[in-house]
Amino acid sequence: MALVKTDVNAGGSHELYLDVRGDRVYVYTAIILSELFTSPDGVTPGDPDFQIWEVTRPDRPRQVGEWGAWAELGVHPADVDDEGAFRVNFTHSVIADGAGTAYLSYWDLGTIILDVSTPSNPTFIGRTDFDVDEEGNAHSAWTGRNDRLLVQTDEDFFPFEGGGFEEAWGYTRFYDIADPANPVPLGTFEMPSTRLLPPGIGYFTVHDPKIDGNDLYLSYYSEGVVILDITDVRNPVQQAQFVPTPAADPRGLFFPGEELPLVWGVAGGRLRPRLGHQLRALGVPLGGLRLRAGPNEDPAADATSGRRRRCRSRTRARWLGSASAGCRRWRGGSRRRRRASSPG
């Protein structure tokens, strides 16, 4: 095996994606603001945020490609758009379809779609964008429907940002990418907490998406794991929600001294809780949310309550079955929020 060192000024890789194509294996890496931090003079683009490394021989990795919006599109990492809004543009994460297309979550620039069929020459295809009153923060993406559907999750920790932006936590967007050069917005999904301000203790922004058939799994920080039926993406229906037991962050990064639920990621139907919660596997029967117990845990403790609770989305009321934690969990008290640059 081998260790690849990035430029010390760039701060290292934030997220990786492994793409296996035939007998070749590639690692796509997102290095936040590399173009800016490695610029020799603040005017000339530095090393691109998105880099492609061939790791067919993992003991001999070699960089074979790169792409940056500053060098390729002329968009500065710290930019004022055509409407006068200040934007920050960088690669936060990347996924690929295994057939030569990569999707870069490029923060305020939206999701950038690249042709990487020739890894040495990534080529711009198209991108999503934001309205002038939308803050941006394209954090992660996932595709479905034979790569004709794009799910984009926007991570916004500061709903009171000001500057003319809407007051809302980050939420989920859906796009038709049958023509990847022209992504077409299909709709959005918000939780009841998305615009209910001020919030309680916690972060109520969406984080990462994963698609399994017509089920969309969303990790949602203090909202836990949210599962949507996206049979009709213009009208996604919340099926279930799991909110873990509140616990203090042992590192003291998130709300020191407070106990709160916090979930970082999902992979299909499997939940990765943060803050030391037990790993659990999720299933979604018709009656609601079923939780399979983790080690040293009472299986009955998280049994489906059988109650039907009413939860509201942005568009209309929907009936859904949920765990006994309810459709959402709130904690009152302090409005303090600790600023951190993209914890996930």
Image (tube, rainbow, N blue to C red):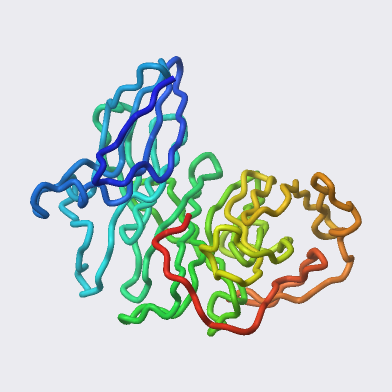
Q: How many marks?
A: 0
| 265 relative to 3, above or below | below
Q: Considering depth in this image, is 44 or 195 the residue closer to the camera?
A: 44
| 41 relative to 121, above or below | below
Q: Is residue 231 left or right of residue 173?
A: right
Q: Is residue 203 visible?
A: no
Q: Considering depth in this image, is 151 or 191 the residue closer to the camera?
A: 191
Q: Is residue 311 left or right of residue 191?
A: right
Q: Position of residue 128 (x, y in %)?
A: 36, 56
| 85 relative to 114, above or below | below
Which quadrant would residue 27 be assigned to in this image? Answer: top left
Q: Position of residue 157 (x, y in %)?
A: 46, 69
Q: Position of residue 17 (x, y in %)?
A: 45, 36
* Residue in the image at 25% along x and 73% along y: 85
* Residue in the image at 69% along x and 46% along y: 269
* Residue in the image at 33% along x and 52% along y: 127
Q: Quadrant of the N terminus?
A: top left
Which quadrant would residue 164 be assigned to in this image? Answer: bottom left
Which quadrant would residue 22 be assigned to in this image? Answer: top left
Q: Considering depth in this image, is 181 or 104 the residue closer to the camera?
A: 104
Q: Position of residue 184 (x, y in %)?
A: 41, 57
* Residue in the image at 44% along x and 46% along y: 178
Q: Is residue 195 visible?
A: yes
Q: Is residue 173 left or right of residue 290?
A: left
